[in-house]
Image: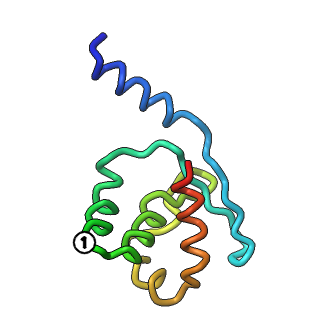
Amino acid sequence: MSILEKASKHYKEQLKEGLHEIDVPEWDSKIYYRKAFNFATQGKVFQLSNDGLMVDALVETLVQRGLKKDGSNAFRPADRIRLMNEVDPNIIIRIVGEINQE
């Protein structure tokens, strides 16, 4: 088995781990996420961050990584505008901070 095959196997094993949970009492909800994520998923977040668009990067992280209990996306890309304009930014910062600690 090549190093790349071993690395890919390791990543796939990480994806099999269960979801992690963040309690969001302000929303009477829970947001779930996986520890593992790939560069394809994170690429847009990196680009936004590198461009100095930190708020956009935070919201993009929540959209990309925030999940429901069943593992489906909690937010759709179309939700970005509402998340940026109609949601308490401190809650988003807290959630994304917890996701990024992993």
What residue do we see at 59% from left, 66% from top?
95
Residue in front for this viewpoint, 74 or 41: 41
What residue do we see at 55% from left, 56% from top?
99
Q: Is residue 47 left or right of residue 102?
A: left
x and y, in percent, of residue 75 in the image: 48, 68
What residue do we see at 46% from left, 84% from top?
82
Residue 73 appears in the rendering: yes
Residue in front for this viewpoint, 100 or 22: 100
Q: Which image quarter holds the N terminus? A: top left
x and y, in percent, of residue 33 in the image: 56, 52
Q: Amino acid at mark 1?
A: Asp
Classify 16 as above or below 48: above
Q: Which residue is mark 1?
A: 51
Display coloring: rainbow
In this rendering, the count of numbered labels is: 1
Classify 102 as above or below 10: below
x and y, in percent, of residue 53 in the image: 32, 76
What residue do we see at 44% from left, 72% from top?
59
How dense is the environment of label 1, judged by Cα within 10 Å: few (below 14), some, or many (20 and up)? few
- The kind of secondary structure element at disc 1 is loop
Q: Outermost residue, top direction?
A: 1
Residue 78 appears in the rendering: no
Asked where in the image residue 69 lies, by quadrant, the reply is: bottom right
Asked where in the image residue 60 lies, by quadrant, the reply is: bottom left
